[in-house]
Image (cartoon, coloured by chain):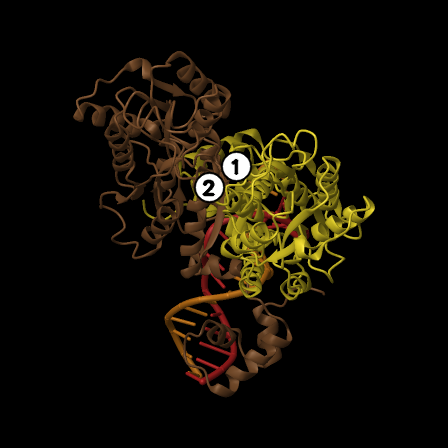
Chain colours: A yellow, B brown, C red, D orange
Amino acid sequence: MSRAATIKDVARRAGVGVATVSRVLSGSGPVSPATRDRVLAAARELEYRPSALGRSLKTQRTGTLGLVVPDVTDPFCAELAAGVLDCARTFGENVLLDAAHDDPGREAEIVDRLVEQRVDGIIAVPAGEEAAWRAAVRAGVPVVFADRAPAGLPEVPTVLADDAAGVRAAVEYLAGLGHRRIGFLGTTAADTGVREETFRATLAERGLAVREELLVRARPHRDSAFAAAAGLLQSRPDMTAVLAATHLLGEAAVLVARELDLRIPADLSIAMVDDVPWAELCDPPLTAVARPGRRIGYQACEVLLRDPARRDRSRPVVLAAELVIRGSCGPPAGLPGGAARPARTR
Amino acid sequence: MSRAATIKDVARRAGVGVATVSRVLSGSGPVSPATRDRVLAAARELEYRPSALGRSLKTQRTGTLGLVVPDVTDPFCAELAAGVLDCARTFGENVLLDAAHDDPGREAEIVDRLVEQRVDGIIAVPAGEEAAWRAAVRAGVPVVFADRAPAGLPEVPTVLADDAAGVRAAVEYLAGLGHRRIGFLGTTAADTGVREETFRATLAERGLAVREELLVRARPHRDSAFAAAAGLLQSRPDMTAVLAATHLLGEAAVLVARELDLRIPADLSIAMVDDVPWAELCDPPLTAVARPGRRIGYQACEVLLRDPARRDRSRPVVLAAELVIRGSCGPPAGLPGGAARPARTR
DNA sequence: CTGAAAGCGCTAACAA
DNA sequence: TTGTTAGCGCTTTCAG
């Protein structure tokens, strides 16, 4: 294997000009069947693979787009990425992936590299700081936000899940079951902000008092989630239900409850946002707000690629989130169906 | 925002030649401090971002590598991808990702596109067919296999988990607990082949008979996994333990056991290969063979990028797999401690 | 220390 | 219908 064949090699071998080879291979322009065959044959014999580099340099389109997520390992992000991949494929686009790990500096660096690579566009689940994204937009790279959007960039098209509706459904479900003292496990990160607000608002709508001591916020890391859950569950034995605003928080709640020997849902009902795979495997299976990660990714990609002209100037696309009811929630102890079980202390 | 600035614009603005700009920005060659400053200033004022396209065309290196996995949504693949991303970052390489969904045709198509993009190398969890990979190798693209490798391409460097050791540990653990009738849930896909072989071999080593009726193979899809698990658990009530060769199969086993009201581990011990997140959330938590997906990805990337010369001609890198013992396995019913145990041990 | 110029592989006018 | 040619933006000799 010497050097990869170039369009020139093919042209020479087929006894035609490079333009003809280009025409044949890209299917543009008129070519006589005879020459077409000769070119095709030459290309095949040389195992010619056109170089995207040359083409991109000329056409100013790379046929690849950037995808920036916080963490590929997170099930929601993975679903979202899968959606992007699906859609990109239908458009024949490649996907350059990177993880920013909620670090604005790292995110800025990634965006920088994506711009250097001259991607045709970027789909991002942004870490929050808008600086990096302003830069991308200024650089002329189309950007679409997915799942969340930094404040201050309303002109960037966005595809979101209807978190508010999901949380509202969950809280109403819990309240409908008879719960009056419902806890909330949130984070200090911006994206659980609307979840908390909606939690408060829904409680208020139902005439339930919002008890600040039942609302706790963890930093978005495993340890912190666990600590927050432990603190809440241990210090508030009168709490009969809890809503976790993320699957990490949900996981923490389940584990802490188990450690505390709380029976679910008899002693404590648990629901969470994000219907990750383990929700179903849990015992009892966890009630969760299913947010359509895959569809969000797919749509974000579609918004980016489908007629870029109209892309801007529209309000966010909001996709429905659905409450998936499983076995982790029940009436609070003391209510019909709940009282039958012995009340456990601690 | 008119047109993105090019190196020419910067040169003109700084009053120097393009070569000087290139030298300054790439840090190569000697430049007087004065001109360096002028160039830097001009670049900053113009918000100049060098184009990777021009550079790549010239240098014949794109600074990006391809990553091909079966499915980004699979927790193991996601971990592996995260490892690749980590390592690629330390080398300043970008990662072009795609999912082949175990479809050889699709995989071939992906490889084709990667070659067109002139990636510097490809890391793949291959679907099995070697044709596509031969083509890549012939095209002169360095390839490294991760987690599995198609037969017939021994010259391609490979990074694997020590599945055999992991399975052996699991079977010995089960046998040590007193189980004599251990079932095996495998797949028709090649990668669970060594797991099955090791399962048989270990049984034999311990002087236990291999009962063919306790070995079942599913196609690598959710439904099939479920059907296989249901078939095995329902028809073999005398089986006291089962080893699932993949997490999908493990999931199926857990769900079916629950449906059948089997107590775990009192009625049935379950262990599986791949320590996915839900293993810990399960009740009881599942004993599993933890295969280091992240490290596999990291190492595969390292092998690809770190001194490419010595890359070939070495045997596979094999990373240890560890048996993580949790609560899903216990002595079989009928043995001391087996029958007496309460259903919900941890 | 710096600039001019030759491509890298391809596409798209423009000619023929 | 086909060939020639001028770049796309960059790096890299090679002179100066």
Q: Chain of mark 2?
A: B
Q: Is residue B153 above or below residue B92?
A: above
Q: Position of residue B200 (x, y in %)?
A: 24, 23
Query: Is residue B294 shown to the viewer in this render?
Result: yes
Q: Is residue A82 left or right of residue B137?
A: right
| Closer to us: B10 or A165 | A165
Q: Residues within 10 Å of mark 1 (few under 14, many from 20)?
A: many
Q: Is residue B102 left or right of residue B193?
A: right
| Closer to us: A343 or B266 | A343
Three-letter amino acid code at the position of disc 1: Trp
Q: Residue tagged by mark 1?
A: A278
Q: Position of residue A61 (x, y in %)?
A: 61, 51
Tags 2 and 1 in contact by the CB under 8 Å rule?
yes
Numbered disc total: 2
In the displayed orientation, state which residue is furthest to the bottom.
B34
Q: Is residue B56 left or right of residue B166?
A: right
User: Which of the labelled discs sits on residue B277, or is there none?
Assistant: 2
Three-letter amino acid code at the position of disc 2: Pro
Local secondary structure at mark 2? loop
